[in-house]
Amino acid sequence: MLFELLTRSQALAELTWPAILSKREEFRKMFEGFNYAFISEFTEKKISLLRSSGSMLLSEQKIRAVVTNAKQMHKVIQEFGSFSNYCWSFVNHRPITNSFRYARQVPTKTPKAEAISKDLMRRGFQCVGPTTIYSFMQVSGIVNDHVSCCFIFQACSQHKANEKNVRAEPALPDRRLSSASSEDSDIREM
């Protein structure tokens, strides 16, 4: 799931979050359900097919970056046990909770995002600048940037207070919940 969130964060350079979320199934089909093992085996022919099939979701550069990143994912998982362990190691396996009062105070990047970005690029990942990585940190729950008056901020803060240790995978929306509407799950994923 984190590979999917990283890929979606990369798409922000070309699309908006509402556009990305509305085309979620197209992205999943395009990238084999975001299975990095399958994506890492994409050939030139497959990449060309994605571009020529009328799928204008991402530029060729972004598609190639996703394929390259899928290949690098194997190495990170081999070294850290999971991509989750790698990501959470930068924040001591605890989510960062900011208490911004106004949306204009929320940064587009931070020194922590710059450090992760630099390390990912050193490992051969592409299109993972600090702004993309900070967006990834927000959407994956590594950082809580909801403004302090937002009900989701309160829920995330409550969750953090109740949980002594973060699980290997951060708390993300459970797609199996039938009581939540798809619109609600879109909001939680943002």
Image (cartoon, rainbow, N blue to C red):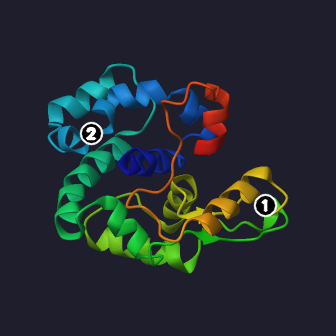
**Residue placed at 24% from the left, 56% from the top?**
73
Q: Is residue 58 above or below residue 71?
A: above
Q: Amino acid at mark 2?
A: Asn
**Residue placed at 80% from the left, 60% from the top?**
103
Q: Is residue 54 above or below residue 40?
A: above
Q: In the displayed structure, does residue 91 sit left or right of residue 118?
A: right
Q: In the displayed structure, does residue 113 sit left or right of residue 16?
A: left
First reached walking from the N terminus: tag 2 or tag 1: 2
**Residue placed at 47% from the left, 66% from the top?**
166
Label 1 sits on residue:
147
Q: Considering the numbered disc 2 on the image, is that residue within a helix, a strand or a loop?
A: loop
Give the x, y percent position of residue 158.
Answer: 69, 61
Q: Is residue 84 above or below residue 31?
A: below
**Nearest the camera: 59 or 131?**
131
Give the x, y percent position of residue 87.
Answer: 39, 66
Give the x, y percent position of residue 13.
Answer: 53, 49
Q: Amino acid at mark 1?
A: Val
**Nearest the camera: 73 or 16?**
73
Residue 145, visible in the rendered structure: no
Q: Which mark is residue 164?
A: none
**Residue placed at 19% from the left, 45% from the top?**
40
Q: Considering the numbered disc 1 on the image, is that residue within a helix, a strand or a loop?
A: loop
* Spatial CA span between label 2 and label 1: 33 Å
Q: Residues within 10 Å of mark 1 (few under 14, many from 20)?
A: some
Give the x, y percent position of residue 190.
Answer: 62, 46
Residue 31, visible in the rendered structure: yes
The N terminus lies in which quarter of the figure? Answer: top left
Label 2 sits on residue:
35
Mark 2–mark 1 contact, CB under 8 Å?
no
